Image: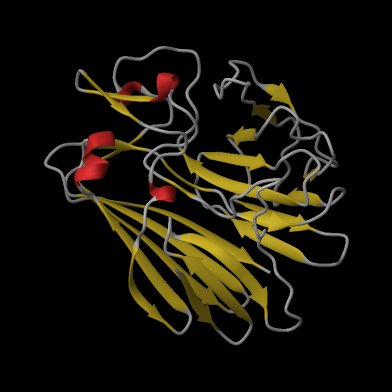
């Protein structure tokens, strides 16, 4: 079911399945900024990634001597959230741990996603609360796709000259080497037909906390990804959208570990503590 919010400048819709953003439209001219999904290209729009990002080795979550099945990008995107507060320009959705989640992820939690329209921006806050009596290990990420064209530019706020990226191979494992990425004037990542032939580009150690999608039609999306340690940039090759993905966590690499607590990029949360991921897209 889709839930709608709006303010003076924007309207938005959210799907309670996965708490996935479905639409962000300008009231000035009705322009749709969010990719609308196409099963022939990419069916998704803005999936929420929890409690895992990317793929785990053997699709297993290893914790405290046991193995749990865990699909790519976790289970939250396939589960129905409860709409707890939808009014005006704000909507809140919550997913609570249950018998099904505990079979895949051995921790009790509340996971809340809040959408709020503020001026010409949408602010999305993801909040995880650990309701277990033990340290919880997890990853958390966002995956929104925005309409654009080949030839448009993603411009970083600060110079990223010399930036390197990691890539993902056909087995959905990070290649254990960093690659140079070409940025025009140290800031602009030009969207080309073959840019994503080898899947996502994964940035880390960036100077910037903001990247702006600049389109040749004069429209733009200023995307603030805060303190996220990883930023994924991805689309299907030659597709008319790009995903800007702040991640607290990352795909597995080829280094074998025996417990999820040893995984690169893993987040830990003590009992009753909360953790936030916030992104803001201003159009």
- The residue shown at (41%, 25%) is 59
Residue 207 at x, y percent in the picture: 63, 42
- Residue name at image x 43 percent, y 31 percent: 265
Number of numbered discs on residues: 0
Q: Position of residue 179 (x, y in %)?
A: 71, 22
Q: Residue at coordinates 51% horizontally, 39% vertically from top-left? A: 229
Residue at 54% of width from left, 21% of height from top?
Answer: 173
Q: Residue furthest left?
A: 133
Q: Quadrant of the N terminus?
A: bottom left
The residue at the far bottom in this view is 8
Q: Position of residue 204 (x, y in %)?
A: 58, 34
121 displayed left or right of 128 = right
As rendered, which of 218 and 82 lies closer to the eye? 82
* Colour scheme shown: secondary structure
Q: Quadrant of residue 270?
A: top left
Quarter-of-image position of residue 71 = top left
Q: Position of residue 165 (x, y in %)?
A: 66, 29
Taking depth in this image into account, of 158 and 113 the one nearest to the observer is 113
Q: Is residue 158 left or right of residue 216?
A: left
From the viewer's side, name the closer residue of 83 and 230.
Answer: 83
Quadrant of the image containing the C terminus: bottom right
Q: Residue furthest front?
A: 40
| Closer to the camera in the image, 216 or 178 | 216
């Amino acid at each position: 079911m889709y839930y709608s919010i709006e303010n003076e400048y924007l309207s938005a819709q959210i799907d309670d399945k996965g708490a996935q953003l479905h639409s962000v439209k300008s009231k000035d001219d009705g322009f749709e900024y969010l990719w609308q999904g196409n099963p022939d290209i990419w069916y998704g729009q803005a999936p929420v990634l929890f409690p895992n990002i990317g793929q785990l080795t053997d699709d297993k979550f290893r914790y405290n001597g046991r193995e749990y099945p865990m699909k790519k990008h976790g289970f939250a995107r396939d589960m129905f959230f409860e709409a707890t507060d939808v009014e005006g320009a704000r909507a809140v959705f919550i997913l609570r741990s249950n018998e099904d989640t505990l079979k895949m992820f051995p921790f009790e939690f509340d996971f809340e996603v809040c959408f709020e329209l503020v001026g010409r921006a949408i602010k999305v806050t993801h909040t995880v609360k650990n309701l277990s009596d033990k340290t919880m290990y997890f990853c958390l990420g966002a995956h929104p796709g925005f309409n654009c064209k080949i030839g448009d530019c993603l411009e970083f706020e600060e110079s990223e000259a010399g930036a390197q990226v990691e890539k993902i191979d056909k087995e959905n494992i990070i290649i254990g080497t960093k690659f140079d990425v070409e940025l025009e004037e140290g800031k602009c990542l030009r969207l080309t037909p073959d840019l994503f032939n080898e899947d996502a580009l994964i940035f880390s150690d960036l100077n910037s906390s903001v990247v702006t999608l600049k389109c040749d039609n004069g429209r733009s999306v200023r995307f603030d990804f805060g303190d996220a340690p990883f930023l994924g940039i991805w689309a299907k090759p030659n597709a008319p959208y790009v995903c800007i993905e702040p991640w607290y966590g990352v795909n597995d690499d080829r280094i074998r570990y025996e417990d999820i607590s040893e995984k690169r990029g893993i987040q830990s949360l003590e009992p009753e503590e909360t953790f936030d991921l916030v992104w803001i897209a201003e159009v």
